[in-house]
Amino acid sequence: MGVKKLIERLRTESLYKDKATLEIMDLCMEDADAISKLQAENTQLLAELEHVKRERDAAVECIHFIGTYLELNSTKDIRKTIEAWKSGLKEG
């Protein structure tokens, strides 16, 4: 059962007086709210995770580029290497 369906069931089925006491109805509504909040937090965390993965991939690419550049150039000036990498990003 999906999360949305579970939340809907908690909210709607808890309202039937012949099935639940007032205390259980309140508990179901609180649970539905908690699940909704957790789902929203989960969605936000997944978005942040994807952002961090993209940043990590860019950093790894930069490290590989710098390593290759330093192997090919005898100047070994890291500032020039970084500027070359940045200009490559702007062009691409």
Image (cartoon, rainbow, N blue to C red):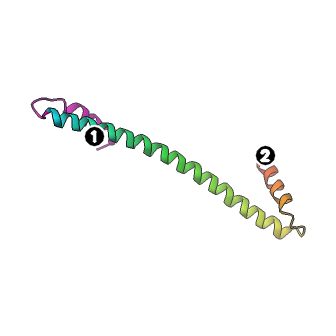
Q: Secondary structure at mark 2?
A: helix
Where residue 26 sits in the image (x, y, percent)?
22, 34
**Whether residue 78 is situated above or below residue 35 in the rendered picture:** below
Q: Secondary structure at mark 1?
A: helix
**Residue at the far left in the pictured view:** 18
Where residue 42 sits in the image (x, y, percent)?
43, 46
Label 1 crowding class (10 Å Cα cut-off): few <14, some 14-19, many 20+? some
Q: Which residues are magenta?
A: 1-21
Q: Which residue position holds label 2?
A: 90
**Cβ atoms under marks 1 and 2 closer than 8 Å:** no
Count how many numbered circles sit on residues in the image.
Answer: 2
> Residue at the location (25% across, 33% down)?
11
Label 2 crowding class (10 Å Cα cut-off): few <14, some 14-19, many 20+? few
Q: Nearer the viewer, residue 4 or 26?
A: 26
Tag 1: residue type? Asp
Hey, which quadrant is residue 28 in on the image?
top left
**Whether residue 36 is situated above or below residue 17 in the rendered picture:** below
Q: Which residue position holds label 1?
A: 31
**Whether residue 56 is situated above or below residue 3 in the rendered picture:** below
Q: Earlier in the sequence, mark 1 or mark 2?
A: 1
Hey, which quadrant is residue 17 in on the image?
top left
Where residue 47 sits in the image (x, y, percent)?
52, 45
Q: On the rendered structure, is 46 left or right of 77?
A: left
Image quadrant occupied by the N terminus: top left
Mark toward the viewer: 1 or 2: 1
Q: On the rendered structure, is 59 left or right of 78?
A: left
> Residue at the location (82% across, 50% down)?
87
Q: Nearer the viewer, residue 80 or 28?
A: 28
